[in-house]
Image (cartoon, helix red, strand yellow):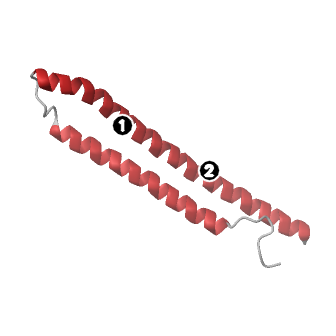
Amino acid sequence: MSGPVVGADPQALRDLQSEVSALADAIDGIQTRLTRVLAAEGRCWGTDDVGATFEASYLPASRTVRSLLAGTESGIGEIAAVLGAATAIFEAAEADARRTMG
C-alpha cells in the first residue's frame, strides 16, 4: 500500500501549520510596530479643544484596534497549534491503520 490509509497528508498539514504560524508572527510584528510608532508620536494632536475632541474618539478606537490585533494574533496562533495536534492525530491514525491492515 503506497498512499495514506487515513486520507490526510501530514506533510501538507505541517506546511500549513508553518504558514499559519508565520501569519500569527506577522500580525504580532505589525502590532508591535504600530504600538512603537504610535508611542513615539505621543499626543501629537495637542491639548486644545480640537485636540481634545480628536483624542476622545481616537484613543478608544486605537485601543480597540490594538485589542483586535492581539485577539487575531492569538486566534491564528491557536489555529496553528490545532493544526499541529491534528497532524499528530492523523499520523497516529495512519500508523494504527497500517498496523491493522498488516
Q: Residue at x 19, y 27 (%)?
A: 54
User: Quarter-wise, where is residue 93 in the image?
Assistant: bottom right
Quadrant that contains the C terminus: bottom right
| Secondary structure under the numbered disc 2 in the rendered image | helix
In screen coordinates, is 47 left or right of 11? left
* Disc ID at residue 65: 1
Residue type at tag 2: Val
- Name the spot of residue 49 as percent of width and height, x first: 11, 20
Q: What distance separates the C-alpha of mark 2 from that of mark 1? A: 26 Å
**Which label number is shown at residue 82?**
2
Direction from residue 101 to residue 76 in the image, left or right: left
Residue 91: give x, y in percent of width and height. Answer: 73, 63
Q: Could you tell whether 95 is left or right of 24 in the image?
A: right
Depicted 73 relative to depicted 95: above or below: above
Q: Give the crowd class for mark 1: few <14, some 14-19, many >=20 residues within 10 Å.
A: few
Q: Is residue 86 above or below residue 75?
A: below
Q: Is residue 10 above or below residue 54?
A: below
* Number of marks: 2
Residue drawn at (25%, 30%) of the image: 58
Q: Position of residue 9 (x, y in %)?
A: 68, 67
Q: Amino acid at mark 1?
A: Val
Q: In the image, residue 50 lies at what x, y percent?
A: 13, 24
Rendered view: 23 above or below 44: below
Residue at far top of view: 49
Q: Are marks 2 and 1 in contact (CB under 8 Å)?
A: no
Instruction: Assign the N terminus to one quadrant of the image.
Output: bottom right
